[in-house]
Image (cartoon, grey):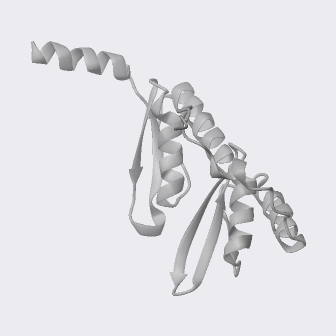
Amino acid sequence: MERRERSGRRDRRDDQPQEEVSEKVQQLIRQAEDDLVDSLTPVNLLQLDTNERRQVHRHFDRSLEYATKTYKLAENEFELRVYPVGNLRRLAEKSAAQAIQTGKKVALPPMSSYERFVVHEALKANGSVKSASYGEGAERHVEVEPDLYGRSLKKMIKKIKLI
């Protein structure tokens, strides 16, 4: 009886040979990267078959600068969005620095729920600012403001109240 080693989870992609990326997909990737250089808005890619979507996902998901998501539009119609999460994180950090320096709220432009999520996550570790979403619908946006007392002081106050 053979014994199998349990070295953790095995990635399926390691077992399969690397597939060739089509010329169409290479052009889409180059165009998307050019469009995302200084952008905060995602690039929408339509009319891709399943294999092409998979190739685009693989390319962009190798980088921490981008995130991809597929949305179902109709029965057999999908939209692939490439988000410039690196740019969103840098905007969040720049806004946090501005809020700390000025002592005032900084309002970011309207964003989708995923983009707001990326901004909130980027600011979560910064104890000097707090962020919240405001507005309705397409006008919903993030506001970053300096946290006067910091999160650690608030945690201590909670502990004191529990005693």
User: Which residue is pictured at 54% across the width and 71% down the height?
Assistant: 71
Q: Residue furthest right?
A: 23
Quadrant of the image occupied by residue 70? bottom right
In the image, residue 93 above or below residue 20: above
Quadrant of the image occupied by residue 149? top left
Q: How far across and how far down the image is residue 6, in percent?
A: 53, 33
Q: Is residue 13 visible?
A: yes
Q: Residue furthest front?
A: 1
Foreground: 32 or 138? 32
Quarter of the image that includes the C terminus: top left
User: Which residue is pictured at 82% across the width and 69% down the height?
Assistant: 25
User: Which residue is pictured at 84% across the width and 59% down the height?
Assistant: 34
In the image, residue 109 above or below residue 1: below
Q: How far across and how far down the image is residue 21, in percent?
A: 84, 65
User: Which residue is pictured at 86% across the width and 70% down the height?
Assistant: 22
In the image, residue 63 above or below residue 82: above
Q: How far across and how far down the image is residue 18, in percent?
A: 80, 56
Q: Is 127 on the left or on the right of 76, as rendered?
A: left
Foreground: 42 or 62? 62
Q: Is residue 66 visible?
A: no
Q: How far across and how far down the image is residue 45, in percent?
A: 70, 73
